[in-house]
Image: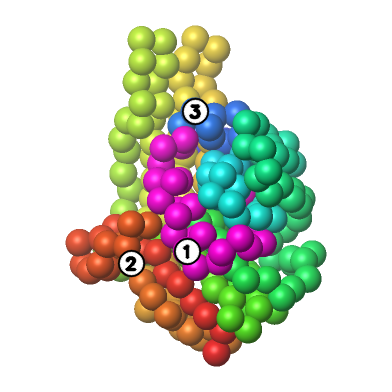
Amino acid sequence: MDQDEQTDRIDLHRADAYGRSFTDVYDRWYDGVTDADATARFVADRCGRGPIVELGVGSGRLAVPLVEAGVEVVGLDASPTMLARCPPTVAGSSGSPPIHRVLADMRALPLRGPLPGVLIAFNTLFNLADEHAQRQLLAEVTGILAPDGVVIIEALDGTVLADESSQVPSIGVRDRTHDQLVVTATTVDTTTQTMLGQHLEIDDTGITARPWLLRWLTPNQLDELATDAGLVLAERFGDWDRRAFDKTCDVHVSVYVAR
């Protein structure tokens, strides 16, 4: 079966598409993809004990250290299989706040404010694969934010991708063991500002295709969408440890407040 046929088996515009592709391997592949403890410290510094809403909470990779840092978390995800892996409490952390798990599409938040913080980490915003959906989410977030609340967004810097040629395919090897090979294939489309990818997991049972789709933004474009939603940029860093954001940074951590 070719890549297009594999990709068609999962509608990448569905709210739960990412979970359908990666639930069974997420904790193994992405446990250390970003510094979760630094994320928790950063969010706690700005939101206190919360509660904060983490959109795309998944299996709780960030929610657990947030709770351990004393922050109450409302974790929302559209994938029931991912959300089932997120613990409601943290074992061994007596007195820690709970993780309130909510199964819902983040484009229609079933939450009421005012809340002191919303966390949209690790390209979760870009999993919404069109501009309308991204605008809708930011508007929803603004609607539940407390007057002094913050929206914290971690995302790749799409500026480098915007400078590429119109269609940029690439193939690489993500992982290799004696009995397994994971090949990655991605195509960047600068016209639609999308990145379409496949992780092809090859082992003795066959080939498993794990497709994904992102709609990336440059920081300036994100600021424009935030402004239209009633938010204004307050801080921007190159990582969770507050590195200065400059042209050498691949990602940014941006903090927005209500205007």
Looking at the rendered structure, which numbered label has been put on residue 28? 3
- Kind of residue at disc 3: Arg
* Residue named by callout 2: 237
Drawn side of residue 15 relative to residue 219, left or right: right
Residue for point 58% across, 81% down: 148
Instruction: Kindly state the secondary structure of the residue where label 1 is placed.
Output: helix
- Sequence-wise first label, 2 or 1: 1
Q: Is residue 153 above or below residue 209?
A: below
Q: Nearer the viewer, residue 39 or 24?
A: 39
Q: Amino acid at mark 1?
A: Asp
Rendered residue at 53%/16% (across/down): 206
* Residue 49: % across, % down: 61, 60
Mark whose residue sits in front, 1 or 3: 1
The residue singled out by tag 1 in the image is 45
N-term mark: 2 or 3: 3
Q: CA distance from mark 2 to mark 3?
A: 28 Å
Vertical side of 241 occupied by 84: above or below: above
**Image quadrant in which the C terminus is located:** bottom right
Instruction: Check if residue 78 falls in the magenta segment.
Output: no
Q: Nearer the viewer, mark 2 or mark 3?
A: 2
Of residue 17 and residue 66, the one placed in the foreground of this image is: 66
How far from the left and from the top, in percent, is residue 203?
A: 47, 15
CB under 8 Å between discs 2 and 1? no
The stretch in magenta equals 30-58
Residues at marks 2 and 1, CA–CA distance in whole angstroms: 14 Å
Give the structural element (helix, strand or loop) at label 2.
Answer: strand
Q: Residue at x 55, y 73 (%)?
A: 150
